[in-house]
Image (cartoon, rainbow, N blue to C red):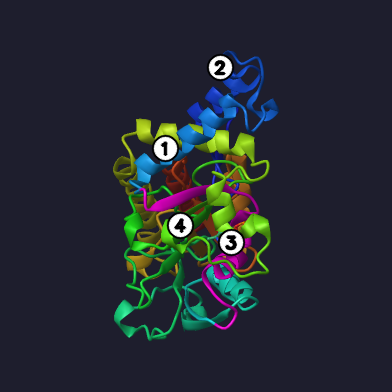
Amino acid sequence: DPDRVFNFAAGPATLPANVLKKAQAELYDWRGSGMSVMEMSHRGKEFLSIIQKAEADLRTLLNISDDYSVLFLQGGATTQFAAIPLNLCRPDDPVDFVVTGSWGDKAFKEAQKFCKPKAIWSGKSEKYTKIPSFDDLEQNPDTKYLHICANETIHGVEFKDYPIPKSGLLVADMSSNFCSKPVDVSKFAVIYAGAQKNVGPSGVTIVIIRKDLLGNAQEITPVMLDYKTQADNDSLYNTPPCYGIYMCGLVFEDLLAQGGLHEVEKKNKKKAELLYNAIDESNGFYRCPVEKSVRSLMNVPFTLEKSELEAEFIKEAAKEKMVQLKGHRSVGGMRASIYNAMPLAGVEKLVAFMKDFQARHA
Ligand code: PMP
């Protein structure tokens, strides 16, 4: 489609073209209801069918058992940085954090208001390019839970496997790799993710939580952050982000139609391999600082050896309709976010551009 760019933004991010077209076709009159989804009562049968289908499809995609509640909330993953300790701990409880990038660090800092978190490992001194060996982790024997950020969006560091938490409770921020590959949900106490990278627009936050953990929130917990209230009310305690949930539902249908998350992962691996190979085979013209075994399939940070050319790279790429390639302001360089909805053609075009740019500037 000549009107569309290849959008490498980290989030909000590109959505599948067929999903956008379906939403467009249903916008004015959702399936003969005579209204758009934005105009429906969140308690009417139409919207209930939408949210129930979205939940059922997500449960199928991730093979989520009945031992878990699935919640569609607001406030972004950032709100969950507070909600998780409020729901899982008393103020004096110790909690372990493995900090592999700036999102994990933000979660760690917010938790300090509601419990006694400890960063048992931090990759900061190595500029967040690594994941620790799990054997070396010194977990506190009394820790309530172990928190990780499964994919660091800014630094491009992704857990390929998960540590076994001493307390039995592993909590993961999956904002930027949610539904990008199969995940064994039974290994986790809580999984949370903002929707705006892989599964929908901003404004929806998905929380998957083991049901036996509900009902222990600290007394000061705002009602909107109490998972039990949200679970008891099927995410309809107040007015939910209806349109966003509808969009997530369309994305889940699309992921199922692609054959599920095993198939999605295969495509993501192929795209990431293409891009990392282009970087690694550039004789140092392009560089990715992240240790190879933990490179993210979703967010690919890279720099130019001749860093003075980076602005030119970004400008020329934009002229060729490849946008949002600037790295996060905290790390500089470039970052290509290649979420589920980035087509292979987008990555192929980027790689061809990178080779051409190198030939002109080497
Ligand atoms: N965690 C991760 C891994 C993220 O990438 C982001 C957003 N970029 C956040 C948390 C914060 O999410 P939100 O903006 O939805 O609060």
The answer to whether one can see residue 356 in this image is yes
Q: Which residue is mark 3?
A: 80
Query: In 3D space, how far apart are the residues under numbered discs 2 and 3 (Cα atoms)?
Result: 34 Å
Respond yes or no on whether mark 3 lies under 8 Å from ligand 1: yes
- In the rendered structure, which segment of residues is drawn in magenta? 66-92
- Inspect the image, locate mark 3, and give the three-letter code of the amino acid beneath it: Gln
Where in the figure is residue 104, as x and y percent of width and height? 53, 70
Q: Which residue is mark 4?
A: 209
Q: Are marks 4 and 1 in contact (CB under 8 Å)?
A: no
- Inspect the image, locate mark 1, and give the three-letter code of the amino acid beneath it: Ala
Specify the label residue 137 is tagged with.
none
Residue at image point 33% right, 46% down: 63
Q: Secondary structure at mark 2?
A: helix
Where in the figure is residue 6, as x and y percent of width and height? 54, 39
Q: Quadrant of residue 242?
A: top right
Q: Nearer the viewer, residue 357 or 197?
A: 197
